[in-house]
Amino acid sequence: MNMAEPLVEAPVLFEERAGVDGQRIGIATLNTPKTLNGLSLEMTRLLATQLRLWADDAAIACVLLQGAGEKAFCAGGDLHGLYRSMRAYRESGSADITTNTYAAAFFEEEYRLDYFIHTYPKPLLCWGHGIVMGGGIGLMSGASHRVVTERSKLAMPEISIGLFPDVGGSWLLARVPRGAGLFLALTGAPLNAGDAIYAGLADVCIESSQHDAVVDALVAQRWSGDAAADRAALTTLLNGLSTKPAPGPLQAHLDTIEALVKAGSLEQVVAAIVAAQSDDDPWLQTAQATLVAGAPGSARLSWELQQRAAALSLADTFRLECIAALHVAAHGDFAEGIRALLIDKDRTPHWSPATLAQADARWADTFLVSPWPADAHPLADLDSSLHHRSHA
């Protein structure tokens, strides 16, 4: 090796810790802290391969998924790579949304990985410290044990970039108590540890200073090899280290939010949120401002997808989101949202449609038309009969 060449760190690090009785703990660390561990297609593939190997290895008793650095577990997906692929697709003049091969692979493989985590056969602990947004929610939400810390900040802020809460977000948010998931989709409002647990996006709160103690406890645990018993043992282990977080702003404003999202049609809900008295409350004011500045098309798609996902299986939700995501990448506002936020950084996106009246239900229906026959959908093999596993 030429010593003058810098060492290239892998974007995901994998290690195994020796436990008792020959058992091992698998640890996967997202390792791009400079981009807040944003999830690339390469990282998705590395994770999927290793998680499958660990699932099939009888000596691996439990898996820990975490992010490098102190700022984020995972702040979202690889927007720069998606932007480049969207530009190239649009310049090609193709009318076939599946010919954006990077976006097609990105969404299919990300959703497949997320679904695999939801159905993982062993205890899988996600350490959701710091920022957990978009693609980070996708990785975390299916883990059997989802830990937040005093510095966790969870959100689905896709309305600001012309996307919608994907990675199963339609399914997850449709199940937030008292209809608050719609508010979270329309406003991108962030959740602290207490609110994340209330919303069903996390299970326990543990002080970040206890991270090493958690790893030591995983190593010292006597695992039975029975998945249900081992998940129960991990629940007991984590509860012994947990703290009870204070309720956050979502819970503080829950009565107001429930009334707002029950205002009627999407147009009525949006008008009610924008007109709501925020009483100098910065959380509510930021939520309102995000909605006003966000893509009307994203608001409509979020609404339509949550309406459908409330009655769908998780697998069917991923299939529907995959269709919508490819349409958004092909001819929606996603590229414009990324341009305004990350490329030109002018923060003045030109949304099309520009108003909610133009982004009506008939407009949204065109984003839900599958480019494949049902049996040819790239996620056709996800099993709709599998029930989402209950969490800790």
Image (cartoon, rainbow, N blue to C red):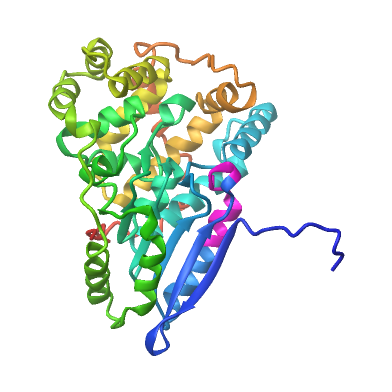
Seen at 47% across and 44% down, the residue is 372
| Horizontal side, residue 230 vs residue 213: left or right | left
Kindly give the residue lying farthest to the bottom in the view shown.
21
| Horizontal side, residue 125 vs residue 256: left or right | right
Q: How many marks?
A: 0
Hey, which quadrant is residue 307 in on the image? top left
Can I make out residue 118 in this image? yes
Instruction: Name the foreground residue: 293 vs 245.
Output: 245
Range drawn in magenta: 34-47
Position of the C terminus by quadrant = bottom left
Position of the N terminus by quadrant = bottom right
Q: Is 90 in the magenta?
A: no
Q: Position of residue 221 (x, y in %)?
A: 32, 78
| Horizontal side, residue 339 vs residue 146: left or right | right
Q: Position of residue 283 (x, y in %)?
A: 30, 24
Seen at 41% across and 26% down, the residue is 159
Seen at 50% across and 23% down, the residue is 333
Kindly give the residue lying farthest to the front in the view shown.
209
Q: Position of residue 6 (x, y in %)?
A: 78, 57
Hey, which quadrant is residue 300 in on the image? top left
Instruction: Name the foreground residue: 105 vs 389.
Output: 389
Instruction: Name the foreground residue: 340 vs 74.
Output: 74
Q: Is residue 341 above or below residue 314?
A: above
